[in-house]
Image: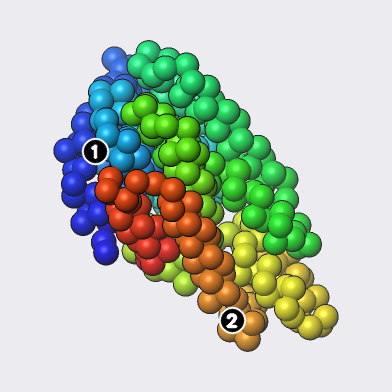
Amino acid sequence: MILTDLTKPIKKDLGRVEEKISNALKTENVFIQQMVDYLSHSTGKRVRPALAILSAKHCGKLSEETISLGAALEMLHVATLIHDDIIDNSSVRRKQKTLNFKWGNEISVLMGDYVFASSFYLMAKDLPKNVVSSLADTTNIICHGEISETFNRFNVDLSEDQYLEVIKEKTAVLFAASCQTGAMLAGGDKQTVKSLYHFGLNIGMAFQVVDDTLDFVGKQTKVGKPVMSDLREGKLTLPVIYCLTSATRAESKKLKTIILRKIKTTSDLKFLDLLLRKYDAINRSLQKARYYADDAKMALSSLNSANGKNEFVQFADFLINRDF
Ligand code: IPE
Ligand code: IPE
Ligand code: MG
Ligand code: MG
């Protein structure tokens, strides 16, 4: 299943989300508008608005509010990406140069703030208090996650549990909130809202684990961002954590040294590759992603199957099988 097939039934709604985003970011300031236009040239997968729309549809009501929600969610996501690329020192995103690469860190911090603020303005204007409150809380948690991750740079003793907590905070909670608030706006009952929240949380975990394997095995032309960059930035992700916990003492010591010197040589790379293969670290990570995807599907069991439960299952399958 490819993404465009999955989102075909909601293509029109996603088109309205695009329009809403461009209106929300519109400004008379020529310089800011230039960056807004630049950002709109390459738009990403739009997974979070899609989840919000599917969740609202599942609960039987797609209103103008849902479109605002989709736009606000995507803008929130984009704001975190702008800041994330500064922190991660990334030069490419969505197959084009990052804002920080083109305009520098100072302007990009402020531009991230501009997009954040525009997202919250849209929420305040169009969405009910319970939804805004959930999204504000989610944003707080995302900040926690990004801060913990940055704090743990080059922590070669990072445990699997610590890693899982970080990805839950930086990524999974926004997937959860997208499903949850989509259902809330559509008047979904308590159980449905809760089930969709858990579905989102678990596919969000799977999504980030897959993303972290793509950093090792993905193609830059496909994923649209540089590969082999997490470890060089001191970010220990699941495949490396598996290597470190399975390796012999000597291997583990050597790998830690290599990480701390930022994988300088081809022989460093070769050694890393050797351990990844020896300990089957990519497959084991993907296995973990599938385990989360299964939990996500389990969370759907209380949903009414007449109302497009299948779309959620297909979405989960797409997210774990993706190569971009
Ligand atoms: C990238 O998210 C950041 C992560 C949480 C891994 P996406 O992969 O959804 O990025 P876009 O929106 O498609 O560019
Ligand atoms: C992105 O994390 C998560 C947020 C922006 C909150 P990553 O740093 O792992 O994502 P990419 O690889 O830059 O897309
Ligand atoms: Mg990051
Ligand atoms: Mg990053």
Residue 91: x and y, percent?
46, 50
Residue 201: x and y, percent?
52, 47
Q: Is residue 295 above or below residue 171?
A: below
Residue 264: x and y, percent?
64, 70
Screen quadrant of the C terminus: bottom left
Q: Nearer the viewer, residue 237 or 49?
A: 49
Residue drawn at x 64%, y 49% is 166
Which badge, 1 or 2, is on the more N-terminal residue?
A: 1
Residue 169 is labelled as none
Local SS, label 1: helix
Task: Report, in whole angstroms, how far the alpha carbon at label 1 lies from the one at label 2.
Answer: 39 Å
Residue drawn at x 53%, y 65% is 291
Instruction: Work out which residue is located at the far right of the displayed protein and give it.
Output: 249
Residue drawn at x 44%, y 57% is 297
In this rendering, does residue 205 appear at all?
yes
| Tally of marks | 2
Label 2, residues with CA under 10 Å away: few <14, some 14-19, many ≥20: some
Screen quadrant of the N terminus: bottom left
The residue identified by callout 1 is 14
The residue identified by callout 2 is 280
Residue 66: x and y, percent?
31, 28
Q: Nearer the viewer, residue 309 or 235?
A: 309
> In the image, what residue type sits under mark 2?
Asp
In this rendering, does residue 121 appear at all?
no
Local SS, label 2: loop
Asked if marks 1 and 2 touch (Cβ < 8 Å), the reply is: no
> In the image, what residue type sits under mark 1?
Leu
Side of 142 where 73 appears, left or right: left
Residue drawn at x 47%, y 72% is 217
